Image (spheres, grey):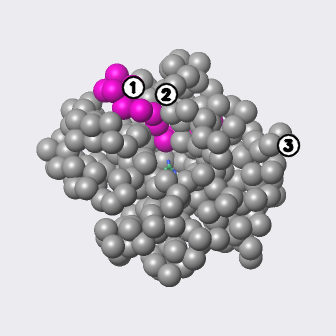
Amino acid sequence: MTAKNPICVALDTPDIARAASLARALKPHVGYLKVGMEFFYAHGAKGYETVAAEGLPIFLDLKLHDIPNTVGQAMQALMRLTPCPAIVNIHASGGADMMKAAAEAVDGRARLIAVTLLTSLSKADIDAVGFDPALDTASHALRLAKLTQSCGLDGVVCSPHDLAGIRQNLPRGFLTIVPGIRPEGSNVQDQKRIATPSAAIAAGADILVIGRAITGADDPAQAASTIRAGLHAG
Ligand code: C5P
């Protein structure tokens, strides 16, 4: 699936009025809105519904990671939101049984995606967690992506640097959602494994998650529109 407009803007704010006004301003320029933990934990279903009412499909980025029974029940609760989120996610490192429990609960009502490795983690960070240091990050991400696909999920969240291996080894219909996006010359901040929007699309990204490069701009709508125009030009 390649979205017509592959930009998913991360509304990383706990402020409900700001989230709603960003959603309204960005609606003509982006394909999806991403609602994350800081917003959902602060405002719950009511806040979610306020943002979703702006009409764009929602990626509800709560990255569930717990025992299979808990994740399955949490997913069932998320499927009762109105409207149902277009995309929901879990951590692939929660294991096969957890992913299958989530898939059963979602039951095709949303795209279910697994996070491979957070883009804020460097190789040293990943080694420190206890992953095999002989493998590079792309190999870890590919292993987790293969496990994700074998559990019947729709795709993964991965770094732009991990895309090539995933594209070479998994079917084209397997969705890749890619954060760590930084337009040429913008501030890297806490992200470590990054790419420009057009480089990520060229590497096979289906959806680009972009937060601060849009929401932190003086004119977020203009920033989103410029990024989108750059994708068509590239
Ligand atoms: O501001 P920035 O573009 O770095 O925001 C990236 C967004 O993508 C944040 O909402 C972050 O939670 C999310 N994300 C990420 N890395 C992942 C998964 C999600 O940065 N592996």
Q: Which residue is at a point 27% across and 37% down the rendered structure image?
A: 107
The nearer-to-camera label among 3 and 1 is 3
Q: Which residue is at a point 76% across and 54% down the rendered structure image?
A: 227
Q: Upstream in the sequence, badge 2 or badge 3?
A: 2
Q: Quadrant of the N terminus?
A: top right
Q: Which residue is at a point 42% across and 72% down the rendered structure image?
A: 50
Give the Cα distance between marks 1 and 2. Answer: 8 Å
Residue 152 magenta-drawn?
Answer: yes
**Which amino acid, mark 1?**
Gln
Which residue bears the numbered disc 2?
174
Q: Secondary structure at mark 1?
A: helix
**Which amino acid, mark 3?**
Ala
Query: In the rendered structure, which segment of residues is drawn in magenta?
Result: 147-162
Left or right of 158 in this view: 82: left
Give the Cα distance between marks 3 and 1. Answer: 33 Å
Left or right of 203 in this view: 105: left
Residue 23 magenta-drawn?
Answer: no
- From the top left corner, tell me how far across and down residue 6 is, in percent: 63, 45
The image shows residue 148, relative to residue 222, as above or below, that is above
The image shows residue 201, relative to residue 119, as above or below, that is above
